[in-house]
Image (spheres, rainbow, N blue to C red):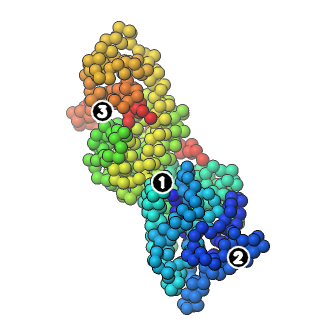
Amino acid sequence: MVPDVSTGSRTRGLLSYLFGPGRRDEHTDPHIVAAFAMPGLPDPGRSPLDQHHQLLDQLADYLDQPVRAREARLGQKVPQHVWHCPVRTAPGDRYLTDAEWAEVARRIVNATGIAPDQDDKGCRWIAVRHADDHIHIMAITVREDGRRPRNKRDGQRAQAECRKIEKELGLRQLNSGDHTAAPMPTSAEQAKAQRAGHQQTAKEWLQEQAQAVAATSRNEQEYFSTLTALGIHLRYRIGPDSGDVLGYSLARPGDVNAQGEPVYFGGSKLAPDLSINRLRERFTAQQPTTPTRAVGEPDRWRQADTALRELRFVFPGWHDTDEKAGGGELEAFASDAVVQAHAAAFGELLHTAALTAPAHARAELRAAATSFDRANRSRVRAEHQQAAALRTAAKELLYTAGSGQDGDAAAALLSTAVFVLIAIARWHQGRGHQQQAAAAQQALVHLRTAYRHTAEPVVADLTRRTPTPKTTDRLAAHVQTAVPDHAQRILADPSWPALATALAQAESSGQPPHRALAEAARQRELTTADRPAEVLLWRLRHATADRIDQRAHIARARTGSRTTTAPTSTTPAAAPTGIQPAQDPARRR
């Protein structure tokens, strides 16, 4: 159940809309279901057609009487005296009766301070129903005694009351808001988008574009230049004394008002983290992202994978997260501010990966990145400088020259990303961040699909290189002794031939298969895995990458050498202009 509080100054205008046909003739049977004083109150929806406008005038005059009395006493107009709160049930909920909607309206005007129970001096209000799934509560914010109501934080109070009503009426229980979400598009914006044939409103489209561009930009100048390169109109807010940029607004190409002028939305109005100050915090906290050495595309994906796996020091036991554990809290080594910073950097990595991943995974990665943008916004203030390494690794993906064709490295990164996303979702859930946890879970669905699209060719290639039957049988014997409880399921898994190839490769590099299997199996349970062989395959490949990283770290420590810089082109191969207008990856979905 979703309430949406707003204010205005035209009583008669709002009444005309509530009792009218609607903007697209969507209103049916408009009528009053509850009011501050039902007996004798004119109901324009239940009157003869020839009396409709006259009754609208009478009702507006009746509601506005306390306003005119206050204006006469004070000698000035009462500003924004019309209080409006539509209340809508969630899709799939049953339709409430008029009597149930009347009780909902009374509870909301009481909870918000508009008309408290047992207070006969409260504001005048009515509740109009003109559709099956919602009502509109309209009130005049001048009490009978001439005072203004005490309705501060009325939106939050209405939300809290709706959570109680949902539970009592058996409706779908929505997540409580925390005022970090991006503003929802208005009905007028939605209607405008429909007329123009757009699937998204201008606000939604701009928000999606700006989030993606911010994730791929190294600094403020690059952010604004990329937006303008996409054809988006940009307008700065300049300080009158300093001449500095204090804010900015964006307008969608072709989105104009009645005068033919672009319709602008401020950055902070698109989303809280798109304000100029929040963007500057992110840009100033990241390391320079010009490539520090000439590396190939697979190396950049592996560098990003290594940076992601370092989050095991932020989330202890994140390899052990299990979605089936429910709402248990996942503790962290780091402070909440540091975790939030790494979550923000992880969101940027999803956006850059969506530009450079194998083509068949990009659409799902874009969807994952867009969903995760909501999970990034919480009341926890991020210490962005603490996640500079991960953010730099995310930006480095933009310099890949092969357009994400190295599926092996990309699949390894995405399998790690699944672990990280589960950990972030659990962290939000444990701290009561319901909206963020839900967004992370939604992103997880898309990320798993992207992983599957990327991993399947890799697993197929490993399957084609399965060792000889004699070697495969010997490796199967190692499975029987190292993982006896799951050996039958592992050997029956379609991914077993690929795992056999990986075990043969590990053996050729000097790692005994029995030890490799035992170590991979100990990382977390296999009972809930639908494809245990594929689970062990990626654990084994992660372990191999960890050993390579450890050897490289020891070698650097012994020599005391540093990688010399050999800057390459500073232009990302996958330019942002391409932006479109707890389980293992193989576990049960």
User: Residue at (46%, 77%) from the top-left corner?
Assistant: 118
Q: What residue type is labelled 2?
A: Leu
Say which amino acid is labelled 1.
Gly
Q: In the rendered structure, which amino acid carries the disc numbered 3?
A: Arg
**Residue 322: x and y, percent?**
34, 38
Q: Which of 41 and 417 is in front in this view?
A: 41
Residue in the picture at 58% in, 52% down: 205
Residue 273: image quadrant is bottom left
Q: Using the image, tell me which numbered label, if any, was put on residue 55.
A: 2
Q: Mark 3 points at which residue?
A: 524
Residue 281 in the image, given as x and y percentages of width and height: 40, 57
How far across and how far down the image is residue 556, in percent? Answer: 26, 34
The residue beneath circle 1 is 170
Q: In which quarter of the image is residue 503?
A: top left
| Left or right of residue 425, residue 562 in this image | left
Q: Is residue 215 left or right of residue 390?
A: right
Secondary structure of the residue carrying numbered label 3: loop
As displayed, is residue 456 above or below residue 14?
above
Q: Which of 478 and 377 is in front in this view?
A: 478
Quadrant in which the C terminus appears: top left
Label 1 element class? loop
Tell me the crowding category of disc 3: few under 14, some 14 to 19, or many 20 or more residues within 10 angstroms, Cα based.
some
